[in-house]
Image (spheres, rainbow, N blue to C red):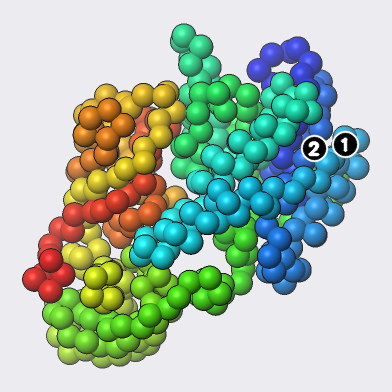
Amino acid sequence: MDAGPSPRKQRIVVGLSGGVDSAVTAWLLKRAGHEVVGIFMKNWEDDDDDEYCSSRQDFLDAASVADVLGIEIEHVNFAAEYRDRVFAEFLREYQAGRTPNPDVLCNAEIKFKAFLDHAVRLGAEKIATGHYARVREAAGGRFELLKGLDGRKDQSYFLHRLSQAQLARTLFPVGELEKTEVRRIAAEIGLPNAAKKDSTGICFIGERPFREFLNRYLANTPGPMKDDRGRTVGEHVGLSFYTLGQRKGIGLGGLKERGAARGAGDHAPWFVARKDLAANTLYIVQGHDHPWLQSDALVADDASWIAGDAPAPGPCAAKTRYRQADAACRAAFAGPGGALALAFDTPQWAVTPGQSAVLYAGEVCLGGAVIASASMRERSPVAA
């Protein structure tokens, strides 16, 4: 496999995270004849310990990989940039009752901005990461962001805010491979992290209890928890601590509400369906397929388009959350740089303000916007 865009030797700085994907990325580029330098990014300092957010162990793993590959590695601290550009926005969004996606912002502001700037200062012609995505140069010198070939691992959703300038200097070598092949290569060449478990969760939270973490930074104002008939069925601990579609951690357990679910069954699970910030009320419903969890349309703002301009209005496909199949829809735009409106062919489940609506044309990621609101398929007077 040719990991670089041409046979010409280039100086490429690779973001080594300590994981197997970035390790194989560095190996592929070195095998292709490039001069490879590794950078380990430390993005979080508060409460960074081995139990939850083990950047120390990740750096040791990254350093071990660099040693095996025979490349240099530098430890760079971007914690201040991360706190200002990503974490502060994360907290603002949660405080406003929305559910942000910090991975999207981290890619745009840290991994492909602060990291790219640092790499350029080191004389890099390109940067590379272990993301499962691809970059293609199209007609007219434009660059396209493509889905990774492994559909189960595709990460283009998280990269949809990248610009032409960023994509022009970025390589995603493992985007051309299946994850199983990446693991096989790592084991074959003797990488020390070949069997390392993939990281999950938000980097600054790790595997720690999410509500416990947020409670350190956000005020919690308890209020009523109501069902779709307006009946109070419990008390929430603060609207910021819930997200639409949430099932676990609501606190009702096996509460039986006779006739509450309109065919869902007395013991059907409860889901968070709506937040009323003005009344500090959380609405919950029974049953995964409850109408309040289905949306025919959405409006999104703060749009970012890979090509630099919004795509043409009309039929397209979109994801409203990661690991979701592309959903057929129609896109409309409210003027230059205005809001994005999507109307779906079939209702979408738990469309959540703060998350990203990302548009696709086949394997090409067009960009996206931040979901501001969604239209429920059916509304009750108590939730109007």
Residue shown at the point (28%, 76%) measured from the top left: 280
User: In the image, residue 99 lies at what x, y percent?
Assistant: 40, 60
- Distance (Cα) linking label 2 and label 1: 6 Å
Disc 1 marks which residue?
72
Q: Which residue is rendered at x = 26% and y = 53% of the image?
A: 373
- The answer to whether residue 138 is left or right of residue 188 is left
The amino acid at mark 2 is Gly
For residue 92, above or below residue 334: below
Residue 198 place in picture, x, y as percent: 65, 55
SS of the residue at dot 2? strand
Q: Residue furthest left?
A: 381
Helix, strand, or loop for circle 1?
Answer: strand
Quadrant of the drawing holding the N terminus? top right
Residue located beneath label 2 in the image: 38
Name the residue type under label 1: Glu
Q: Is residue 6 visible?
A: yes
Q: How many marks?
A: 2
Q: Who comes first in sequence, dot 2 or dot 1?
A: 2
Cβ atoms at labels 2 and 1 below 8 Å apart: yes
Q: Is residue 144 above or below residue 274?
A: above
Q: Position of residue 266 (x, y in %)?
A: 22, 86
Residue depicted at x 68% and y 65%: 46
Is there any visible trace of residue 210 in the rendered image?
no
